[in-house]
Amino acid sequence: MAAEQHEELGISNITIDGIEGKLARVELPDGTTQDWRLSSLPRGIKEGDVIRINVQGGDMDLEIDHEETDRRLALGQRQLDRLNAKAPDGDLDL
């Protein structure tokens, strides 16, 4: 019997879009969302966290990518600051 071969999938990122009860809504690399059990994700996750998924040889490792999370949060803040700067009184009213 031949050994089953697994494709090496490598590293990808998902983003925690929201948490409700025992589920987290995650945004996948293609932009779609899915609900995942919190128990399947790293402890201590929060909305906005980027999770690095590394799949090698059939094994999957998940960890919070703090550096990427911080980078995305800073980028979002810079975009918000640019929008606020364009508002007549410096603030946007939503």
Image (tube, rainbow, N blue to C red):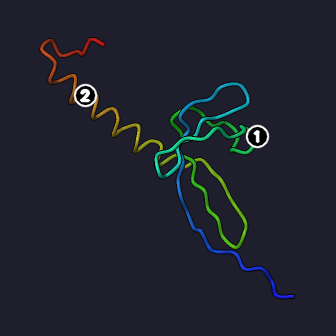
Instruction: Name the residue nearer the viewer: 86 or 34.
Output: 34
| Crowdedness near tag 2: few (<14), some (14–19) or many (≥20) residues, C-alpha within 10 Å | few
Marked residue nearer the N-terminal end (2 or 1): 1
Check disc 2 and report its element: helix, strand or loop. Answer: helix
Residue 67 drawn at (x, y percent)? 47, 48
**Quarter of the image containing the C terminus?**
top left
The three-letter code of the residue at mark 1 reads: Ser
Q: Looking at this view, name the residue that lies furthest to the left.
A: 88
Residue at the bottom extreme of this rendering: 1
Element assignment for label 1: helix
Residue drawn at (40%, 45%), measured in percent from left and top? 71
| Residue holding disc 2 | 81
Figure quadrant of the N terminus: bottom right
Q: Which is nearer the eye, 80 or 94? A: 94
Residue 47 picture location, percent across and down: 55, 32
Q: Mark 2 belongs to which amino acid?
A: Asp
- The residue drawn where x is 53% and y is 34% is 17
Residue 78 position by quadrant: top left
Percent coordinates x, y for residue 83 in the rendering: 22, 26
How busy is the neighbourhood of tag 1: few (under 14 within 10 Å), some, or many (20 plus)? few
For marks 2 and 1, give the one nearer the viewer.
1
Disc on res. 75: none
- Callouts 2 and 1 close, C-beta under 8 Å: no
Q: Quadrant of residue 88?
A: top left
Q: Residue at x 22, y 22 (%)?
A: 84
C-alpha gap between disc 2 and disc 1: 36 Å
Give how far across and how far down residue 38 sits, in percent.
71, 37
Numbered circle sitting on residue 39: 1
Task: Judge left or right: residue 83 versus residue 69.
Answer: left
Q: Is residue 10 left or right of residue 80?
A: right
Quarter of the image holding residue 82?
Answer: top left
Is the residue 21 above or below the residue 43 in the image?
above
